Amino acid sequence: MEAGVSGVHHVKIWVSDLALSRSWYERVLGLELRTSFEDDDGVVRGMAFDVPGAGLQLALRENPELARALSGTDPFALQTTGEGLDVWAAHLDALGVPHSPVVRASAGHVMGFLDPDGLQIRLYAPDAGVHAARAGQAGTYRPSLVPGPDGGRG
């Protein structure tokens, strides 16, 4: 096959309240608005943002039913460094965003927190030494729900 994939263009997540999620993602992840999408009725129900430093876009799409269905899942992880995890923990603490501790994962270290709809956002710091020590099914990290201020929904 000659065609290939050269990277990730965007990740789309569904949210129950676009305005609330936009505010949260801009404040917590520092997202920068790229564009908005109007539906046929003229109402903006989608937005795309640049994730600074990541070379990818994160799209938010308002659909309360799908947002509820995805609550508690962790469909993607954002990459950082081991030192970056400490900086993220301090940033989240300053914003009052509950988060997990930094734990060993299948190929590095990870921490997580919840968005306003209960979607789990993971910050992952790869570490080749951890991967070598924890390879295999028994060493695979299985994340649990990150507790939020309302007992698990963030």
Image: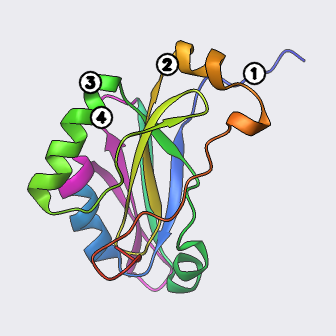
Earlier sequence position, callout 3 versus callout 2? 3
Secondary structure under tag 3 reads helix
Between label 1 and label 2, give the one nearer the viewer: 2
Dot 4 surroundings within 10 Å: few (below 14), some, or many (20 or more)? many
Between the residue at mark 1 and the residue at mark 2, the CA separation in whole angstroms equals: 27 Å
Earlier sequence position, callout 1 versus callout 3? 1
Q: Left or right? Give the position of 83 relative to 9.
A: left
- Residue 101 lies in the magenta-colored region: no
Quadrant where the N terminus sits is top right
Report the residue marked by disc 2.
127
Q: Left or right? Give the position of 106 relative to 96.
A: right
Position in image of residue 134 (x %, y %):
65, 26
Between the residue at mark 3 and the residue at mark 2, the CA separation in whole angstroms equals: 12 Å
Report the residue marked by disc 1.
4
In the image, is residue 130 above or below residue 141? above
Position in image of residue 116 (x %, y %):
34, 73
Q: Residue at x 36, y 54 (%)?
A: 100
Position in image of residue 5 (x %, y %):
69, 25
Report the residue marked by disc 4.
85
Q: Are marks 4 and 1 in contact (CB under 8 Å)?
A: no
Q: Amino acid at mark 4?
A: Leu
In the image, is residue 114 above or below residue 152? above
Secondary structure under tag 2 reads loop
| Magenta range | 27-54
Q: Are marks 3 and 4 in contact (CB under 8 Å)?
A: yes
**Residue closest to the eye, 46 or 108:** 108
Dot 3 surroundings within 10 Å: few (below 14), some, or many (20 or more)? few
